[in-house]
Image (cartoon, rainbow, N blue to C red):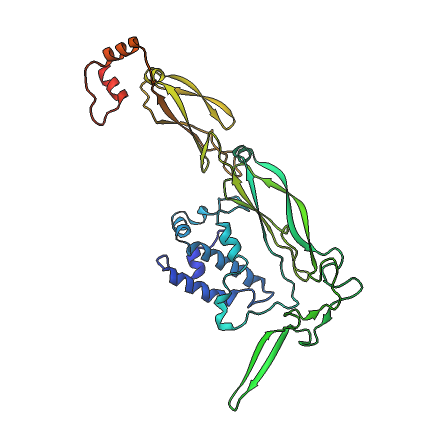
């Protein structure tokens, strides 16, 4: 199913200003935020859609990329699980941490109380080599995370005891204050300060987790990296994040890929770039040179009269496309090496070959050679 247009999601035109985009986001967030629609899966998915559109259109660089390439600028086609969004922004806003100010008209943020809540998402940065990215790989990483306490099973209470209903709020997690005047009555609702909005209190906390219901552990997680993965793309591992609250599902683990710089190759999407040097004789007369590739070596034919900094293309010698048998190309820049010292005889032969003709502005050494041939 094709993704919706980001402008359509926010209900703004393509010429909308940043202020228009911000206002549209605030308006939709008030309506669809999960805290306003507890337990409503449709509202949760709708808000994720709105938040994703806002992350792109509120950033000038991402917006320009989206306007030019559409969704393909951030998520390669037919490659589920990877994206190219900035991870800092993703984790700052995906969890709704910076946008509670949009509820300024609603007063205090609504507490979840005793409702199950999904655990926090985790981020893990995995550095691999260019060769690993070319072949693809499977590895095992160690992820520190909070899990359900093995002693109290997440209740937070000492085994044999259980949390009790908060006597102050009666288990609702809320305190209602009624104010009456001669003309009206107002009701103020705030989280219970005794149970912190949870609705329950623990008289005898679990010694292992100190009443939190969670303990920190390090788990080994297998990660399969597909061939062709690029720098700053990431893999989402569902359910491998931190434990949920009150029976809620665990969060997800995002493994961010960092590809190390290579000593020979420079990567641009699926193409690889490198340079090689040839002697002046090969440049003038032509010949063959051996150049490195990501899989070994290849023979490059140099035609006669090759100019320095000419770029040759080796088709199909680049990086693989994600989930495809196709590969990019390798581009080789040829740099002609001019000898720093020559013998008297060599100097005499070159002078005889060139004659007394002076160099013309804008023409190179090899162009002059061709003219005199």
Residue 58, position in %: x, y? Answer: 42, 57
Q: Is residue 98 left or right of residue 307?
A: right
The residue most toward the bottom is 182
Residue placed most toward the observer, 326 or 178: 178
Residue 304 lies left or right of residue 76; in this view the side is left
Vertically, is 299 above or below 326? above
Location of residue 272 with respect to 297 vertically, above or below? below
The spot of residue 305 in percent (x, y) is 31, 19
Q: Residue 95 location in percent, x, y? A: 55, 58
Q: Residue at x 52, y 41 (%)?
A: 258
Of all residues, the one furthest to the right in this rendering is 160
- In the rendered view, does 331 fall on the left or right side of 127? left
Quadrant for the C terminus in the image: top left
Residue nearest the viewer, comparing 324 with 291? 291
Residue at image point 51% right, 90% down: 183
Task: Give x and y (percent) for residue 112.
Answer: 61, 67
Give above or below for 251 relative to 365: below
Who's the residue at 64% across and 55% down the image?
250
Number of disc labels: 0
């Amino acid at each position: 199913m094709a993704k919706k247009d980001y402008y359509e999601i926010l209900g703004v035109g393509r010429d909308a200003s940043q202020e228009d985009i911000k206002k549209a986001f605030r308006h939709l967030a008030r309506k669809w935020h999960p805290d306003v629609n507890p337990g409503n899966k449709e509202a949760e998915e709708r808000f994720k859609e709105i938040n994703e559109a806002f992350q792109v259109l509120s950033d000038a660089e991402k917006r320009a990329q989206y306007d030019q390439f559409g969704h393909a600028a951030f998520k390669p086609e037919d490659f589920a699980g990877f994206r190219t969004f900035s991870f800092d922004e993703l984790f700052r806003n995906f969890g709704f941490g910076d946008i509670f100010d949009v509820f300024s008209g609603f007063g205090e943020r609504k507490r979840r109380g005793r409702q199950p809540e999904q655990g926090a998402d985790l981020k893990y940065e995995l550095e691999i080599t260019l060769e690993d990215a070319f072949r693809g790989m499977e590895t095992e990483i160690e992820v520190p995370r909070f899990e359900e306490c093995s002693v109290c099973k997440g209740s937070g209470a000492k085994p044999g005891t259980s949390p009790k209903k908060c006597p102050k709020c009666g288990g609702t997690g809320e305190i209602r204050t009624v104010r009456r005047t001669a003309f009206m009555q107002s009701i103020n609702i705030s989280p219970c300060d005794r149970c912190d909005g949870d609705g329950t209190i623990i008289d005898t906390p679990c010694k292992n987790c100190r009443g939190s219901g969670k303990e920190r552990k390090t788990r080994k997680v297998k990660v399969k990296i597909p061939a062709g993965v690029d720098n700053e793309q990431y893999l989402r591992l569902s359910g491998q994040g931190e434990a949920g609250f009150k029976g809620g599902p665990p969060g997800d683990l995002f493994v961010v890929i960092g590809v190390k710089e290579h000593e020979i190759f420079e990567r641009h999407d699926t193409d690889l770039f490198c340079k090689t040097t040839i002697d002046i004789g090969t440049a003038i007369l032509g010949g063959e040179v051996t150049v490195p590739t990501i899989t070994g070596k290849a023979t490059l034919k140099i035609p006669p009269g090759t100019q320095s900094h000419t770029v040759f293309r080796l088709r199909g010698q680049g990086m693989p496309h994600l989930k495809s048998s196709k590969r990019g190309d390798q581009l080789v820049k040829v740099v002609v090496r001019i000898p720093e010292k020559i013998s008297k005889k060599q100097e005499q032969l070159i002078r005889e070959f060139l004659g007394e003709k002076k160099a013309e502005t804008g023409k190179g050494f090899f162009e002059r050679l061709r003219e005199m041939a």
